[in-house]
Each structure stands twice: as structure tokens, then as C-alpha cells.
Image (cartoon, rainbow, N blue to C red):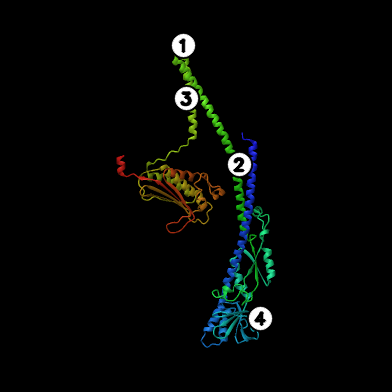
Amino acid sequence: MLNGAFKGIVVIVTSLVVCIAIMIVYQTFEKTTEANIFRLTDEIEASVSRTVTTEYRRYLILRDICSSAAADDSGRSIEQIIQDNSVIFGSDGDMSNMVNAIGYYHEERPEAAREYDIIRGEWRELPGVFEKKKDARYPDFEYTGSDTEKGNFYMVLGIKDTGMAMFFELDRDGFIDNYVKELVESVNTDFKIEWFRGIDDETAEVLKQQYRSEPSRYRFRPLSILFRYEQNRKPLIIEIPSLFELRRTILREDDMRVPPQKPFLVRAETYIKMIHEDGSYYHEIEHRAAINFLETVLIFIIIGITFVLLLFQLRRTSIMRDKEKEFVASVTHELRTPLTVIRSAADNLSTGIVPPEKLKVYGGLISEQSDRLANMIEEILLYSKFEDKRRSNEKTVEVDLPTLLLGIKPGLTALSEASGCKLNWGEAGLPERVDTHPEIITLAINNLVTNAVNHAYSGHDGAAKREIRVKIKLLIPDKLEITIEDDGRGIDSHEQKKIFDPFYRDNISRSRQEKGSGLGLFITQRKAVIAGGRLSIESPYRRIDGSKPSGCRFKLTLPCKVINNMEKADG
């Protein structure tokens, strides 16, 4: 019996070690989850920024209009050119809600600016609007942004070599509502998005700090996450970048000579509040981390229990070893006793001190002790045979292969049809007599086809044609290849190495409580290896036509020697 104190010490020490390990793992998971949440936040913000940037590139058409104006030699006036180009920005144009008005002025007389109102379709004077403009020189154009006294926002582009400048009054709100908003919402369909604008920098920063967790505040609570004790519906606040912030991308990526602090477009503050329909926008990260953490904790507990059991087993083994020593000593003693009696009787007989009337008694004693000794030896040999688990090699036998396969096919066909599957059997060009392993062939085909019938299409949606294909062919010079294919649910890559383990069943089979003990593939694979063959799986697999179904392809190869007529005659 194991010592009680030893048990208690082992359990206590192991429990402490496991608890310390779990605490370390918890802190690691908390930091990792926190980092992943902030990474996800950055990714969402970057995605929104890229989406908005894509739409803002529509403003490049303003630069193209100035380019065409500079290159125009038709004799049209600048007002005619502007009026012709304004059509695309009207309510029926391809670029509506981008520009409210287009105007022009001479660099020497910026106070004499004229503007064409696209909405009203009329020209008007803009005296004094651009007198205090800030400008920046580029090889081709001059870009200037100005917040005018009337509160409008303009993009000003100089027309090369003309002394003229063209300006565009931007419809920022209309552009956001008609272009940016629709695209952002279509890209982020899992979120409910609220739009609001007109918030100053200080207020925006307060909002972002309010809804974005600080590292010291985050707490990882796996049980609450999994069982939703606290439903966290935390939103994400994102600032929509303005043209001012994206000027490098929108205007001139290859030649940016304006310092960042010198704007040529006035920034427009627009924000969105994104609320995920399933709760917090990072709930998937937390849920996955919670599952992984609890699995890790379970593994540590299992390791701790295994360690304790191993120590107990080692202790038990030590005790058993002591008992074995006692057994050997006892057997030695028992063997020595009859040997001593036999030797003593033999010595007495050889010296002649035994009277004739006692010869029969001595003979009976020797016979009795000899039988006792023989029985002891037989018992010891029998015990050793119980521990000896030798494995015999599989041997090939001569068999009529078509007849063998003909006997297998009907039962599997009936089984397939009963399950709503079609069994497509192909065995063209097989020899008649071969030297192979009929037992393994029968076992493999039965097991693999039965598995396909019971598991391949179970719970598999969209399988319009349920078919199982069996292909048998001879590989020159001495291999038989058996292939079983289906187009069912397949087997995950991380489980494909486990299916040949004894008693293993995949997650779907266990959850659906499907038939099978988990020994069929193990037995087939082991018998194939013993016979010098191989059983492999491919899921998904590539067919001859290039398609890649989601099902399984099992391929068995076995030694198979063709017996020709000459060999029959010699036999």
C-alpha cells in the first residue's frame, strides 16, 4: 500500500506548481489579448482610412480639368472651358455632390475672381476672397487651400504658363454623404455605423480616449466572455480623414514639397461610431482567447494529474519490483527444495547405504520431487508467454483476384444504395491469378467504403450527387493499388494524422454520434504496413479534370505478384 504522507506531499506540491503555471499563462493571455485588440482597432481604422482615400481620389479630376484648360488651344475663353466642365459636377453628372462652384482669377489681380455656381447655373463676382491666399509651388500646378470669409472651402490650382488660377468650391458634406458614407458602410457590414461631424479636436480626443481601453484598464475574464455574464457592447470611434490629412495621396505623391504644417485644404472633421451587431467589436478575439486559455488550463490540469499518477505508478512499480525480487527469491527457494531432496536421495543410493527394502520408497520420492520441479518450470514458462506478444508477419497467398472482388462488391453496393449513395466500381485490366493478401484487400475495401457511406455525406450540405468511387488497378511491376474516393465533407488537415490512431474519431463523428469504434482504419493501416504496403489519405484531393472536391481519397498499395501460365505449369 502506498504511503499516505507521500501521496499528500505529491498532490500539494503538484497543485502549487500547476496554479503558478496557470497564473503565468493567464497574464500572458491577458497581455496577448490586449495587444490583439489594439491591433484589430488599428486594422479597422486603417481599413476605413484606405476606403476613404479610395473615394477621395475622385478629386484628381480637378487637376485633370486644369491640365486640359492649360492645353486648350481652341480659342475658347476660360469661362467657356469652366462652364463646359461644370456639367459633370451637376445633379445629372458623373461627379455630382463634389463641387458646388468653379471659378478663376488672374494671379496679378486675385481680387477680380469670378465663380460659376453649378447649382444655380450663373456667374458671380468674388471680390477680395483670395487676396490673403497661401500658396505652394509645384512643377506643373500651384495648389492653395483657403477658408474664406464666407465660410466656403476652396481648392486653388494654378493653370500652367497662363498666369491664371482655377478654384473649386468643395461640397465636403455632400461628398461624404454620397460617396464616402455608402462605401464605408458597405465594407463594414457587421457594424452599425453612426455618422457625426463638427466636433473640435479636444472633444474628439476625449471621445476616442473614452471608447478605447487603456492597457492598465483591460481585464481578461474568460468565464464571463464564454458564458456572457457581462454583455460588452463597446463601440469604436474612428475619425474620417480629411483631404488635408490625405494630401500626399490625393494631390502629388511623387513631389510633396509643402511642409505638413502648411495646409492647402482646410480639414473637415467627421467621425463615425461603429457598434458591432454581436457585441464588442473585438468579441471574437476575446472568445477565441478564452477558449484557448481554458484549453491550456485543462492541459495543465491534465499534465498535473498525469504527473501525480506517474509518480504513483513509479512508486507502485518500485513496490512491484520489490515483490518481483521476493518472487524470484521464493521461486529459487521452492526450486532448491525438490533439488535438495533429489540430490540427497541420489547420494544415498549411490553410496549403497539404502537397504533393498527401501529402494522403492527412494524411487517414489525422486519421482514425486521431479514431477513437482517440472510443474514449477511449466508454470514459470507459461507466465513468460503471457508477457511475450510476438507479432507474426503477413504472408501472401495465391488468389483469383476477379472472383475475390466479385464477392466483395454486392454487399457494399447494397449498403451504399440503402444510404442513398451510388457505388461507382472500376477494375479494368486486372490479372486473373495473383499472389497477394486477400484478407487485407477484403478488410480494406469493406472498411473504407463503409466509412464513406457512414461518414462522408453525413451532415454534408449541397451534395447533389452522392457517389463513392472504388478504383482497383495493377501497378507495374508488383503493386496493387486500391483507391476509394468521395465528395463528402472531408477531414480537416490537423486530424488526418490522427485518424489512423486506435479508437480515434473526429469531432464531427463524435458530436453526431456516428457509427464506428475508431479501429477500422487503425487495423487496416497496421495490416498494410506489416504486409509491406501503405495506406494514405488526401483531403481535399485534385481530380483529373482539375477540380478539387472537399471529400477524401484513400489509397492503399499492397504487394501483388502476377502468376502467369508458365508459373502455373511449373507448380
Is residue 153 among the parts visible in the rendering?
no
Q: Residues within 10 Å of mark 4 (few under 14, many from 20)?
A: some
Q: Amino acid at mark 1?
A: Glu
Measured in 3D between alpha carbons, the distance from the residue under mark 2 to the one under mark 4, in whole angstroms, is 80 Å
Task: Give the mark, 2 or 1, whose residue is nearer the N terminus.
Answer: 2
Residue 58 is situated, as x and y percent measured from the top left of the image, at 56, 75
Residue 227 is situated, as x and y percent measured from the top left of the image, at 65, 53
SS class of the residue under badge 1?
A: helix
Q: In the rendered image, which residue does mark 2 sit on?
A: 308
Q: Which mark is residue 357?
A: 1
In the picture, the quarter occupied by the C terminus is top left
Disc 3 or disc 2, which is closer to the eye? Answer: 2
Image height check: is 33 above or below 136?
above
Q: Which mark is residue 148?
A: 4
Q: Quadrant of residue 97?
A: bottom right
Q: Is residue 474 left or right of residue 490?
A: left
SS class of the residue under badge 3?
A: helix
Q: Amino acid at mark 3?
A: Ala
Residue 279 is situated, as x and y percent measured from the top left of the image, at 65, 60
Image height check: is 475 above or below 372?
below
Q: Is residue 120 left or right of residue 549?
A: right
The single residue placed furthest to the front in the displayed view is 351
Measured in 3D between alpha carbons, the distance from the residue under mark 3 to the one under mark 2, in whole angstroms, is 43 Å
Task: Give the mark, 4 or 3, whose residue is nearer the N terminus.
Answer: 4
Q: In the rendered image, which residue does mark 3 sit on?
A: 374
Front residue of this view, candidates 482 and 477? 477
